[in-house]
Image: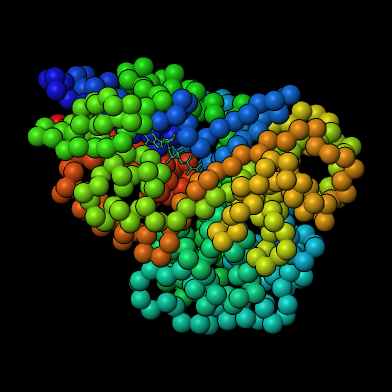
Amino acid sequence: MGHKQTITILGGGITGLAAAFALQERKRETGADIRIRLIEGSHRLGGKVQTVTKDGFVIERGPDSFLARKTSAVELAKKVGLEGELVRNSTGTSYIAFREKLHPMPGGSVMGVPTELSPFLKTKLFSTGGKARAALDLVLPRTSEDVDQSLGHFFRKRLGNEVVERLVEPLLSGIYAGDIDQLSLHSTYPQFYHAEQEHGSLIRGMRNSRTKQKGQEAGTKKGMFYTFRSGLETFVRKLEEALTDIEIVKGTRIQLVEKEADGYALHCFDGSVSKTNALIVTLPHEHIPSLFPTVPTLQSFATTPSTSVATVAMAFPKEAIEIPYDGTGFVVARGSHYTITACTWTHKKWPHSTPEGHILLRCYVGRAGDEAVVDLDDESIVKIALDDLSSFFYMKGDPSFSVVTRWKEGMPQYTVGHRERIQEVRNELETAYPAVFLAGSSFEGVGLPDCITQGQKVANQAWEAIL
Ligand SMILES: Cc1cc2nc3c(=O)[nH]c(=O)nc-3n(C[C@H](O)[C@H](O)[C@H](O)COP(=O)(O)OP(=O)(O)OC[C@H]3O[C@@H](n4cnc5c(N)ncnc54)[C@H](O)[C@@H]3O)c2cc1C
């Protein structure tokens, strides 16, 4: 190893890019003579962030936007000159598909938790018994111990099965494509636990947080999400352009990380070896165990589940399809016979994505326990989506084109005990492989802002570690 210290980042998805950008900032601020390298296994950066532009449409294969409330993504976008490109989503009613019907989301529900009485009483989505059961939340004692539990266990206890299966589950499990009876409350939506603890009731707690939020955003009816006018991949392109002090290596996969006296030897599949003093690993968790075969707790990542999903974007001329609902999309309630799990009316939610006179729909298929559909060919997946949609819309013609994207094991599942398991792995890694850091969607949040925050955090840790 030469005299220069090296920090290497594995993986060029949004987490790796955010880490690289943060390290470049530190390097420029301090003038330190440090070599920073980013190694990406594929031939492109961005990982799950992928945009297709075709015939005037802007189509996202993976994420379509990011939460505005978590500011790390917006701040990074501003740093790479993308402030003027930011677009907020249009707001509108969203629906729940239940028994062949689209029910408007009851007004005042916050991620599935009812906070207003009148729309909750009026909705036909729940039976009278189901509504009465949910109201018990107001009098039930709060959870007594701070141990992790499944989202399903927590919500069923507070609101009853009916409200959970018809409203809470389709909304919450959508983000992880997961099974709420397996997903960890603490690692996915800790805010619900805190609301219940603070207010003695989930309904009261969420009502309170909604009132606060309303106060902050008084007079505005702004969308909660951002994207960029020319698609999320613009972010990747701009970051790549900005990373002029970073060595970016594409098309190289690391097979093994070997500990040496003064750092690590990174063995690549092509037989080459490169050296580093600190290492940031941003790969999906299932790719990590084989890199560090001597860390026992890490081996559990090999069997930590991830769900496979596919997105199906379909473009139509306006006259080919009639949507008799004024809204932005729907999610499908648990136990319905549909294969799609959600559908966004992308032309409504993101008007910039669709040329005048056209319609763009994006459906999801695949969820925990029902992933085989993802392995079907494109034509079959499109047909399934169209069949499902025809229950709700009048379809007069086929799509002018469609874009199917499979994400095999693309959604890491934060199952009960996730936070504690990750901590254990980190503790063990700290001793066995000091100056090696883990970040990304398998660890502390799958959303783009969470990934960016994690990338920035480990960048600082790696920097401190080699100084
Ligand atoms: C269909 C879908 C929709 C989503 N929607 C949203 C959304 O709307 N909003 C939102 O905020 N989030 C959304 N997400 C989540 C978000 O997209 C991801 O959590 C995030 O992009 C993950 O970024 P990452 O950098 O951690 O990982 P990835 O993007 O998976 O990047 C990891 C990188 O590592 C590379 N790699 C793998 N193995 C190796 C190796 N051995 N050596 C070197 N490189 C390797 C891969 O090629 C890849 O580029 C969605 C995810 C999916 C799948």
Query: Measured from the top left, where is residue 34 in percent x and y?
Result: 21, 22
- Residue 109 picture quarter: bottom right
- The quarter of the image holding the N terminus is top left
Q: Foreground residue, 362 or 134?
A: 362
Give the image's coloring scheme. Answer: rainbow
The furthest residue to the front? 271
Q: Foreground residue, 43 or 132?
A: 43
At 62% from the left and 81% from the top, the residue drawn is 133
Decide if residue 248 is on the left or right side of residue 97: left
Query: Measured from the top left, where is residue 282 in percent x and y?
Result: 36, 39
Query: Measured from the top left, where is residue 287 in percent x and y?
Result: 37, 43
Q: Is any atom of residue 308 visible in this view? A: yes
Q: Is residue 104 above or below residue 11?
A: below
Decide if residue 360 is on the left or right side of residue 245: right
Q: Is residue 179 above or below residue 71?
A: below
At 39% from the left and 48% from the top, the residue drawn is 286
- Residue 371 picture quarter: bottom right
Q: Foreground residue, 256 or 282?
A: 256
Q: Is residue 82 above or below residue 438?
A: above
